[in-house]
Amino acid sequence: MKKTIQQHFYFSIGIGLFSVFMGFGLKIFLATVIAKNDLALYYTAIDIFSFSLLVLIGFRSSMVVTYTKLKEDKGILKIFRYFILGAILISWAFVLPYVKHNFNLEVDYWYLVATILSMSLYLYLSNQLAMYRLYSVMNKTSFIEPLLSIIWFVLAFYVSGAHGLQSLFIMSSMSSLSLSLYIYIYKRNKPNEPIIKRVILDEEMKSFIKKSLISTLEFSSGMILIYLSIFFFNHYYSIDEVGDFQVVTKPILMYMITLFVFPVFRFLLPELSKLYYQNEKEAIIKLKFWFYRFSFLVSLVFIVSIYFFGEELIAFLFPEQYAGAYLYLSHLSFFFIFIMLNAYQIAFIKASGAFRLALYIRLSGLAFFVISFYLTKLYSESSIVVVFGLDIAYLGMFLFSWIVERNINKKNVKIS
């Protein structure tokens, strides 16, 4: 029996929890067998590589929407591959030398090349899963990803005898290659990969490129909001307050976003795009009401958990000097509902084709944050004003998105 989109969504949350626990457990294990400096350099290098390939993530939404609208994948994949090739060449020319020499990585250059190539291949194929709406394969891939990392590290470290950075980069590159092979096998019922040749840039393909670049900026804006809050903490407040936010508050917030917000773009966006272009208004309304009920339930549980058990939970998981993080989490928990609802609204807006409006909403969040932070700081020197600024940003984006979503429904036309 074919699963509903709600079942895929719930299943992805369960897999997300599994991946979080496995990933966290792997980090703890690596900390016992890998030198602290090597581990820090590895994760820094992976973060830089991921950031350099950010354009590939931005393509996912536009691939989903354009394919749903046109039902033609060859032009989309050809253009996407050219952008991937460009990202790889730029990374090879600038990012890899920077990482290798600036951090003095004691690992052969080809380890870094293999890592960037394997990460690019995995992102290329995983974007196709969203485009073709292969939800089951997406969930299976998320499930086996941490397992493959563990398997390849054991093989590299204990079987082949590689140590330090070598074992870590072998784990990373081979895990990505294994995932790529898995995806390629499971999507073999789809058309073969188009051959590399010149792409005919008609108006639809030009629109696809424009939406992809706008989507990249929109995704980046959402990430900048978090990093801007870190900048304010570092610039205006003590190292203790920075630690409370960096070590406790931000990771818990990011885990909540990973579990309950990212699946919106992985599963609901492709489904909303299909329903929008098939003009199935009732199905969209039902999906919206279901997600709103689910969001209220998740947010209520989050609020109750933090309000009644937050202090004890932080004391159990972290040393006592991090107790101040409770105040940050208690404020953020009341506004998490707006993060979830805004994610749905952004997904619907992008599903309708209004990528530029989605970007404006994200940029407005940055403006709401900066303005509310500095205005509140005039009356309070407490570091809680940073978190309050985040709260206002999420609330502001929700209200802005609500207006845009309402206008799209009123017009009842497909926005190009």
Image (cartoon, grey):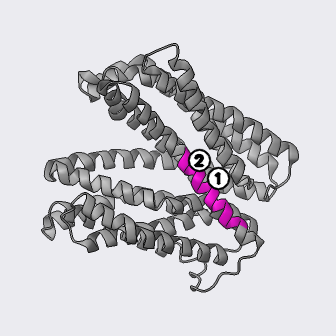
Q: Is residue 9 left or right of residue 230?
A: right
Helix, strand or loop status at disc 2: helix
- Amino acid type, residue under disc 1 in the picture: Leu
Secondary structure under badge 1?
A: helix
Badge 2 density bin: few <14, some 14–19, many ≥20, Cα 10 Å: many
Rounded to the nearest whole Å, what is the CA distance between mark 1 and mark 2?
Answer: 6 Å
The C terminus lies in which quarter of the figure? bottom right
Q: Report the front residue among 21 and 374.
A: 374
The image shows residue 297 at horizontal and vertical percentages of 57, 30
Residue at (52% x, 13% y) in the render: 379
Q: Which residue is mark 1?
A: 269
- Read off the magenta span: 207-221
Is label 1 in contact with label 2 (beta carbons under 8 Å)? yes
The numbered mark, 1 or 2, whose residue comes first in the sequence reads 2
Q: Is residue 208 magenta?
A: yes
Q: Is residue 309 above or below residue 219?
A: above
Q: To which residue does mark 2 refer? A: 264
